[in-house]
Amino acid sequence: RSHMEEFDSQTKKLSDLTGMKYYKFAEACTLEEGTFGNGFLSRIPITDCSVIHIPEKDVDKSVMFYEMRCILKAKLANGFTVLVTHFGLSEKEHINAVEVIMENLEEEKCILMGDFNVTPDNKVIAPIKEKMKDTTVIMIAQRIASVKEADRIAVIEDGTIKHCAPHDELMRISETYRDIYDSQMKNGGVVNE
């Protein structure tokens, strides 16, 4: 069995567990540890799917850990296009990823999701924010600093939304949110390992 089949199998297992009948896996790279990429699950049929590799131009691979990245581009039966990505760690990788996203970000019915490895105020994602300025943005984050300025933040416990409010209100009403915030601020705003 190939690495791709293994990860298709893993994505299928998640599909089965969540009841999301349709799934795709986009292979970005294969390293000693295994195959890495982006997975996507959907209740809506996926009519087309492609893997768009993010170019490695001007990336200094000797400076820090580096792995090839990609975008999974899925077309759904309801007319939506979904782009799934996971940015690398260096600024040049971010710039390369943003260029590819901008080439593939559609004007309407487009969902962009993934781990961007940047804070919302990072200038490198400004072109994406500008193009999507009149849209709804849903962010999933481990760092409260990344979402603190959002209009509403959802606190999810055991798969259930327990609270949904702005930061200041959550600090008053949600013990879980307060605990996470206090813990992260003690560590300079980073997630505990």
Image: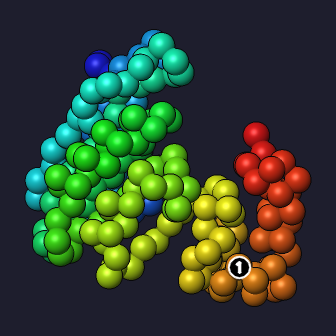
Residue nearest the observer in this picture, 100 or 111 = 100
For the point 11% across and 53% down, the residue is: 48
Q: Quadrant of residue 96?
A: top left
Q: Residue 82: x percent and y percent?
A: 25, 60
Q: Is residue 32 visible?
A: yes
User: Height in image: 86 above or below 66?
Assistant: below
Q: Residues within 10 Å of mark 1 (few under 14, many from 20)?
A: many
Q: Residue 87: x percent and y percent?
A: 42, 42
Q: Is residue 4 visible?
A: no
Q: Residue 24: x percent and y percent?
A: 27, 46
For the point 83% across and 71% down, the residue is: 178
Q: Residue 137: x percent and y percent?
A: 42, 73
Residue 86 shown left or right of residue 96 in the figure? right
User: Height in image: 173 above or below 149?
Assistant: below
Which element is circle 1 on? helix
Residue nearest the observer in this picture, 130 or 182 = 130
